[in-house]
């Protein structure tokens, strides 16, 4: 052995810890519905805003959201980004669109993929609808929706985004 | 220096598994309890909020960010967070009140430890180059400490068993306890060894839960018109991480903190000590200079239920409740962090 | 009333992609030693240590203050660990200051760090949770849609972000500690750099750095005895709001506005652009300069980009209100330390000790940090005078 070896400046020490993940009581009710292909929001008893996906509380008021509201699977693009780098742990190939979408009947956006669209034509206020996986693949996950795709409805003006009724927009 | 009053405290039941509840859902009920105790609506009605939590308990970054969802922080609030037991959030809040930037503060701590293997998770608190890669778990380290105590004749297994027995019996009067029972030292000694020389009963259980407290200036407490106790001293000290350089049979940092907090300035009626292992209660009682006149861990202490990141806060709360109820005039609360009692906080609470 | 407190020592490490020559402990020790040297003090002069860093998952060390106490000379002393997401460096400085302002201590050390080469921030920020869609393509993926909304509202020209990216790198080239040293950077180069998260290009994003920043904060009496000019802390403020709630204003968060109003009031500032001499503001993606110019009241809503384009925030263009003369987060980003670097660099300016990136005659400066989903804010104003 030579004395001329490079000094060791680091070692790899992989850490692996196992956890049983808990979604929460409120989110679990939501996921049970998603399992059946239904999007449900939860309404805050105080400010009456509808959250999806619900996280257990109305973050603005700090109270549990109890009342369930069935929402449409149509939504409006609140904003978006075209991503050109891969996501760790996700097989999707860049470039792809991640959008903040507000479902009709909800007051807050969630993040999801947009696809089946011309990336350069995606815009704030655009109308989209969920493209679901085949029913036999449904699980307790938002991934049941493969992505959202543009639909032929007029754009929603910026000040109306997040305020549409569950009956939707336009027609 | 400004006097600090404790006006409200609540802890959830310590349970082995909080089930479907997520962190926000665990926090909201304890917050609404302390709000009710002083008659306020939410975090908007205090001047400052500080929490204690640890991302690794649930296994995802930013546990405390979810905590903010429980507060009703719209409009925005003055808020901070320590990645420590919430007893240290009390410390930060006291500084805020002393400097005149707040008259009142809400403090909460929460931990859902059941999703992971807590003793293994906590092994990653150790020096990342030398110790953590060996996955030395917290129970093994505590067992090493207990072994030193036994070998040096500083305690006996029976002493440890008596700590457990007293904890279980005291916990019978604590509705929030996870482990309670009329168990004698003999019963404990009859148990098999777990990690020698520790029996399972010598180790605190893994628990889920949260606790919350409201502190304020005396003027504010009077304005709210609720019973209160005074924090007359608080100090915390850390010692070396190098276990080989510490006398593990003593807690030097607890002694220093006790001195700083003025524990010896009066008699101590009650002491709530954050001792996750039975022998550590004995180390702590000695370091704090407690004698037979002190009722130690009347709640059962953390051997009866250990809410990570909240247990230290709960110790202060337990003392507060005993003073306000008239059971005690003056008490000491202790919180700890790190392996083998490396970092310790001592609070003196007195009748107003 | 809060007691007076001042920054009397500042220490940083050279920011770089990988510090393979030091451990995490060695890194924080170096910054702390530099701060002590700057203050003409030694370890025994310190009463307590306040440590900050971003999530423990970055380096995989849980509650690292437990391990770092030895390196920070804290044994036998109080040690507090703050964590408020990306704003943590700023919050930590504020919590450290409260140790003095409350009259509890006379002199404390505060340190913030991140050793990104020993971590995987992208992983830690995107660790998949069951049940939810795994679409967190790092922080950029989160902030890009918000930037897009800002551009829509303000009708800002497309090259504002490019201009900021160039300006902060030219500032960084004046600062030998800055990670990126790009005196030759051009608008064209930034424009042609890879579009990561449209509209955020590679060169419009912060780098990933190893580094630590430390400060010694002292009470009035001790501050006056120091060998160098103190930076007096004239105001401190923190604000938080939830990540997501219905109707949340994400482009210009209320928490940022409230925090700024609070700190300005304490420092007697009515017109920040006029009253302040410079600002060190947390701008990890170039477009956040115009956004924060508005949020912090340096420009009316929708017009922040005009200051940028006019060169008002540029040291090289002789702007009246230089932003990030140190090069900012766009030039160095050890995440957990980035906020404290802003606070420390603001202090360097009013101490007249900022070397080649000194803003001439700076007497009053703002340090700013934000974190989470632009929901946690920490700010301080430091001055050459006590009041």
Image (cartoon, coloured by chain):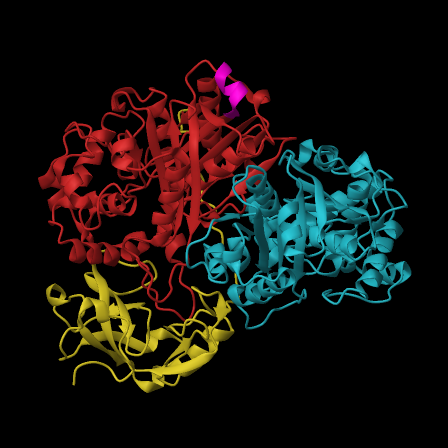
Classify residue C335 by image quadrant: top left
Magenta segment includes B291: no
Residue B123 in view (yes/no): yes
Quarter of the figure that contains the N terminus of chain B: top right
- For the magenta stretch, what is the residue range? C218-225
Return the residue nearer the eye: B204 or B88: B88
Tell me: B8 left or right of C122.
right
**Residue B195 image point, x, y percent:** 74, 54
Q: In the image, is residue A143 above or below residue C229? A: below
Task: Give me the residue at 19% from left, 40% from top.
Answer: C165
Question: Is A25 rendered above or below residue C110?
Answer: below
Q: Main secondary structure of the magenta part?
A: helix
Q: Position of residue C378 (x, y in %)?
A: 41, 43
Q: Colour of chain B?
A: cyan
Tell me the colour chain A is drawn in. yellow
- State which chain is coloured red: C
Residue C19 appearing in the image: no
**Residue at 45% in and 72% down:** A46
Is C235 left or right of A102, judged from the image as shown? right
């Amino acid at each position: 052995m030579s004395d001329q070896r490079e000094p060791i400046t680091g070692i790899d020490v992989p850490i692996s810890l196992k956890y049983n993940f808990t979604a929460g009581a409120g989110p679990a009710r939501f996921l049970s519905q998603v399992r059946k292909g239904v999007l449900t929001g939860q309404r805050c008893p105080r400010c009456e805003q509808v959250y999806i996906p619900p996280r257990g509380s109305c973050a603005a008021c700090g109270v549990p959201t109890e009342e369930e509201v069935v929402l449409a699977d149509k939504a409006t693009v609140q904003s978006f980004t075209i991503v050109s780098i891969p996501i760790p742990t996700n097989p999707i190939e860049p470039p792809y669109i991640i959008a903040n979408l507000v479902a009709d009947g909800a007051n807050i956006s969630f993040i999801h993929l947009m696809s089946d669209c011309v990336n350069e034509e995606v815009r704030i206020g655009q109308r989209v609808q969920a493209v679901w996986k085949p029913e036999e693949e449904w699980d307790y996950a938002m991934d049941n929706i493969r992505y959202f795709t543009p639909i032929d409805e007029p754009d929603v003006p910026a000040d109306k985004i997040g305020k549409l009724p569950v009956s939707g927009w336009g027609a | 220096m400004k006097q600090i009053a404790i006006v409200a405290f609540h802890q959830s039941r310590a349970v082995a598994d909080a089930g479907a509840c997520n962190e926000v859902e665990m926090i909201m009920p304890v917050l609404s309890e302390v709000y009710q105790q002083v008659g306020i609506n939410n975090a908007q009605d205090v001047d400052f909020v500080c929490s204690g939590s640890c991302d690794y308990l649930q296994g995802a970054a930013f546990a405390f960010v979810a905590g903010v969802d429980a507060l009703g922080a719209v409009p925005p609030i003055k808020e901070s967070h320590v990645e420590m037991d919430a007893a240290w959030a009390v410390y930060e809040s006291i500084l805020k009140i002393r400097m005149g930037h707040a008259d009142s503060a809400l403090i909460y701590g929460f931990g859902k430890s059941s999703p992971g293997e807590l003793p293994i998770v906590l092994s990653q608190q150790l020096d990342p180059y030398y110790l953590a890669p060996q996955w030395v778990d917290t129970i093994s380290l505590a067992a090493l400490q207990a072994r030193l105590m036994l070998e040096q004749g500083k305690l006996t297994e029976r002493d440890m068993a008596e700590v457990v027995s007293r904890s279980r019996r005291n916990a019978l009067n604590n509705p929030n306890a996870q482990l309670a029972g009329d168990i004698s030292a003999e019963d404990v000694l009859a148990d098999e060894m777990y990690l020698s020389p520790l029996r399972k009963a010598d180790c605190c259980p893994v628990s889920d839960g949260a606790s919350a407290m409201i502190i304020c200036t005396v003027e504010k407490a009077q304005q709210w018109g609720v019973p209160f106790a005074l924090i007359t001293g608080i100090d915390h000290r850390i010692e070396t991480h190098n276990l080989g350089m510490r006398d593990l049979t003593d807690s030097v940092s607890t002694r220093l903190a006790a001195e700083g907090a003025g524990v010896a300035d009066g008699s101590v009626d009650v002491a709530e000590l954050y001792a996750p292992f039975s022998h550590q209660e004995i180390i702590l009682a000695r370091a704090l200079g407690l004698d037979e006149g002190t009722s130690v861990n009347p709640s059962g202490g953390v051997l009866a239920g250990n809410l990570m990141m909240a247990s230290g806060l709960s110790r202060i709360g337990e003392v507060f409740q005993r003073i306000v109820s008239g059971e005690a005039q003056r008490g000491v609360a202790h919180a700890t962090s790190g392996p083998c009692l490396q970092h310790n906080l001592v609070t003196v609470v007195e009748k107003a | 009333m809060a007691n007076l407190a001042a920054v009397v020592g500042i220490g940083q490490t050279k920011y770089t992609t990988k510090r393979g020559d030091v451990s995490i402990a060695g890194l924080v020790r170096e910054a702390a030693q530099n701060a002590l040297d700057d203050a003409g003090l030694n370890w025994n002069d310190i009463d307590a240590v306040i440590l900050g860093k971003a999530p423990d998952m970055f380096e995989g060390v849980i509650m690292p203050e437990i391990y770092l106490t030895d390196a920070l000379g804290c044994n036998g002393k109080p040690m507090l660990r703050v964590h408020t997401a990306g704003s943590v460096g700023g919050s930590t400085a504020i919590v450290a200051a409260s140790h003095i302002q409350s009259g509890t201590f006379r002199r404390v050390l505060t340190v913030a760090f991140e050793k990104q080469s020993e971590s995987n921030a992208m992983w830690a920020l995107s660790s998949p949770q069951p049940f939810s869609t795994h679409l967190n393509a790092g922080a950029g993926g989160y902030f890009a849609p918000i930037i897009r909304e800002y551009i829509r509202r303000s009708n800002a020209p497309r090259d504002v972000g490019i201009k900021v990216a160039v300006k902060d790198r030219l500032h960084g080239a004046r600062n030998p500690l800055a990670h990126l040293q790009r005196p030759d950077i051009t608008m064209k180069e930034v424009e042609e750099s890879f579009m990561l998260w449209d509209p955020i290009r590679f060169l419009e994003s912060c780098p990933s750095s190893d580094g630590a920043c430390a400060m010694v904060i002292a009470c009035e009496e001790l501050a006056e005895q120091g060998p160098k000019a103190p930076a007096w802390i004239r105001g401190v403020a923190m604000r938080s709001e939830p990540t997501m709630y219905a109707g949340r204003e994400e482009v210009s968060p209320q928490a940022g506005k409230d925090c700024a109003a609070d700190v300005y009031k304490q420092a007697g500032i009515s017109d920040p652009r006029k009253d302040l001499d410079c600002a060190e503001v947390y701008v990890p993606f170039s477009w956040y300069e115009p956004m924060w110019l508005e949020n912090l009241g340096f420009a009316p809503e929708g017009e922040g980009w005009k200051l940028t384009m006019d060169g008002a925030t540029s040291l090289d263009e002789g702007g009246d209100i230089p932003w990030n003369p140190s090069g900012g987060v766009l030039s160095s980003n050890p995440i957990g330390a980035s906020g404290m670097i802003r606070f420390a660099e603001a202090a360097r300016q009013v101490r007249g000790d900022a070397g080649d990136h000194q803003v001439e005659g700076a007497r009053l400066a703002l340090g700013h940090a934000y974190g989470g989903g632009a929901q946690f804010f920490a700010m301080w104003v430091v001055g050459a005078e006590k009041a």
